Image: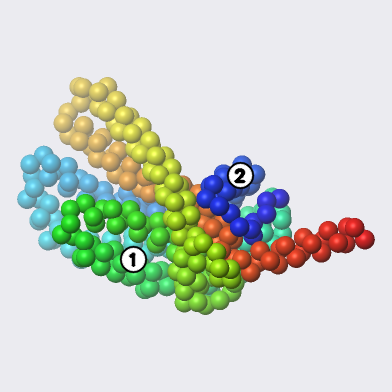
Amino acid sequence: MMQFYKKRDFGALISDTFNFVKLYGKNYFKNYFVINGLLLILMAVLVFFGFKNFFSLIFEGIGGNSASIGRYFLENIMQIIFTFLFIFLVFIMISVVNYSYPVLYLKRLTETGNKNIAVDEIMSDVKKNIGKIFKLFLGFVFIVFPLYLAVYGLSYTVTYRIQGLSFLLLIFLTPVMTNVVNFLIYDYFNRGKGFFSSLSYAIRSQFSYQQYNQKSPFWKYWGTTVILYILQQVVVYAFVFILVFIIILSLGLSLNMSSAETFYITLVFGAMAYPLIIIISLIMSNFISLCSGFMYYDSRTDLHREMDLTEIDSIGRDEV
């Protein structure tokens, strides 16, 4: 079994993430798809039907009928607002469940050492923590998401006059905000403290260890998340490339089709691609969430000492 609560350097954070997938990945992802599968399908269906008309209007605008876009928005403004709001809330709910799963899985694994965790055990943990998950959902909607907007908005306001700086600041801030959110979830479920206490720890632990006067882990955490984000984007863009190739191939094999039929095929592929990209991004985000778990265990220096003492006691008992 892997040792979870220990100090890790930059390389160990990445290598242990992939070692975890190698050792526990089969059981982890089997449970993941059983628990999150229906939610991911729901997300895909909502996005497909919610944006189907929107994609249709975009293609019409490209074809020169731009007036229909403005007319559609004016006539259906309330429907559009409620559709976007509903999809946003569902997306937040799915994100909370999606990001809570690796936390609960690792928590059970570190507590029991069981390599073959059953779906029923994870579902039992979910039911046991349903109140905390709901509070986390509210915290994301009313605190974390507005905090995201405030940080990015303020950063853009300060740097918008300097060309290119806003983009660089976005690249810098995104891994930091991702780590803060993941640390918040890990601490919230592992220590049993309140939302704000865990949020405070999540922010502070990015810059310093809680017990020892050691070098700041900021760049170690930031760089690890950047590497995994690059991996995630490579996989997503590879999927997009394959999908675009299929669309081009389909259109090339249907030269005798009318423009309306060609338009419909392009529309369907476009409407399908967007939710699939979201689903793949959510699945790939597991690597970032798992790595954030190892970062969190790295930050818990109080438990490092407890683990060391436990190992010393165990050695002493064996010698006796």
- Give 268 or 205, whichever is nearer the viewer: 205
Mark 1 highlights which residue? 148
- Give 273 or 303, whichever is nearer the viewer: 303
- Give 249 or 171, whichever is nearer the viewer: 171
In the rendered image, residue 20, in percent from the top left (x then y), is placed at: 61, 47
Q: Can residue 289 be seen in this view?
A: no
* Res 19 label: 2
Q: How crowded is mark 1: few (under 14 residues within 10 Å), some or many (20 or more)?
A: some
Q: Earlier in the sequence, mark 1 or mark 2?
A: 2
- Give 313 or 29, whichever is nearer the viewer: 313
Residue in view at x 29 percent, y 57 percent: 169
* Above or below 316: residue 285: above
* Above or below 273: residue 244: above
In the rendered image, residue 315, in percent from the top left (x then y), is placed at: 83, 58
Amino acid under disc 1: Tyr
In the rendered image, residue 138, in percent from the top left (x then y), is placed at: 42, 73
Q: 168 left or right of 110?
A: left
Residue in view at x 32 percent, y 46 percent: 274
- Element at label 1: helix
* Above or below 143: residue 258: above
